[in-house]
Structure formats: C-alpha cells, structure tokens
Amino acid sequence: MTGLLGIGVDKLRQILNHGRRGAPREVCGLLSGRDGWVTRVYPLRNLEKDPNRFFASPTGQYRAFQDIEQRGETLVGIYHSHPGGEAVPSPRDVEMAYYPDIAYLILALGREPTVRAFRIREGKVWPGRLVVAMPGGEVRECMEFVFGPEGGPR
Ligand SMILES: [Zn+2]
C-alpha cells in the first residue's frame, strides 16, 4: 500500500452517515486497523458546545482504545467532520493533532461530501493519498474521495 490509509467504501459511508446525523455540529471518531488498513470505525460523542469544534468524549475514547487493544490492532486514524467547511485541517485541528503517525481524515459535508487524509506532524500538514477498497474488490488510490448521491463513489 502506497497511500496514507487504506479504507473500504463501507467504512467511508459509516463516517458519512455519522457526519450527516451530527450536522450542523462536527462529529469525530477513531479508526483502528492493521498494516495501514481501517478495520473498524469508532464514532465518538462530541462534547464540544461550539458547533465548529470537537472534543471527543474521554469515556468513549477510553472504551475504544480498550477494544482496539483487545483486538490486537492499533489506532490508524482519527476522523472528524466540517459540516460547512472544506476538507482541510483548521489551525486548531493542527494544534490539537497529537499523533504524528496516524492519518487525520476530514469529511466536508455539502452537495458533494468529500473525504481527505492528512498527516500532521509538529505543526506541519501533509496531504496523503487514500487507498479505497471498492465493493467489487477494485482498489482506487485518490487524493480525495467524493461521495455520489447513493453514498458510494461518485
Ligand atoms: Zn476541523
């Protein structure tokens, strides 16, 4: 795998559904996996009152990390949504990015919901390619994943 993160369309759709349910507030969650591929999505409660920020429930995080450890997996990514914005990290996202080795996924909602992946290290942002596993087994590498009307690839 040469991209930043491997993820199935079904997992991307889970993230999209979470984002849509939570709008107009931001939503967030953890992604666990192996070898850079996402195997499980952990939606977390956003406790932040400011609609343009997120603060993941510490209890939810604790439970998710316990489960990830029990499954013998690792944290491979964190996602959150930008209900009215672009799929790029805000200055606050960069400041709050404590994991230099994982992928930060941002879902921009809108007419064409889009997911992009970034690595954020010491205040610097690197956009990364997503490796998306399609339902038929095809694998597509892309700088952004744009959802079609059915929640699948455009
Ligand atoms: Zn953000």
Image: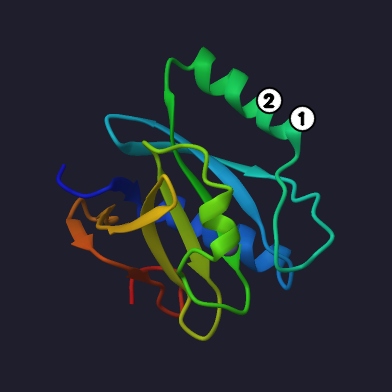
Q: Do the residues labelled 1 and 2 touch (CB within 8 Å)?
A: yes
Q: In which quarter of the image is residue 36?
A: top left
Please tell me which residue lies in front, 147 or 93.
93
Q: What residue type is labelled 2?
A: Tyr
Q: What element carries label 1?
A: helix
Residue at (73%, 73%) from the top-left corner? 24
Q: Which of the image's four quarters has the C terminus? A: bottom left
Instruction: Indicate whether 35 appears above or below 96.
Output: above
| Residue at figure coordinates x 54%, y 66% from the top left | 90
Residue underneath mark 1: 59
**Label for residue 62?**
2
Looking at the image, residue 146 sits to the left or right of residue 35; the answer is right
Q: Percent from the top left, x then y, of residue 55?
A: 72, 48
Q: Give how far across and how far down residue 5 sits, in percent.
A: 30, 46
Left of 148 or right of it: where is 79?
right
Q: Is residue 17 visible?
A: no
Distance from disc 1 to disc 2, alpha carbons, whole Å, reads 5 Å
Residues 139 and 3: in front is 3
Q: Is residue 46 left or right of residue 88?
A: right
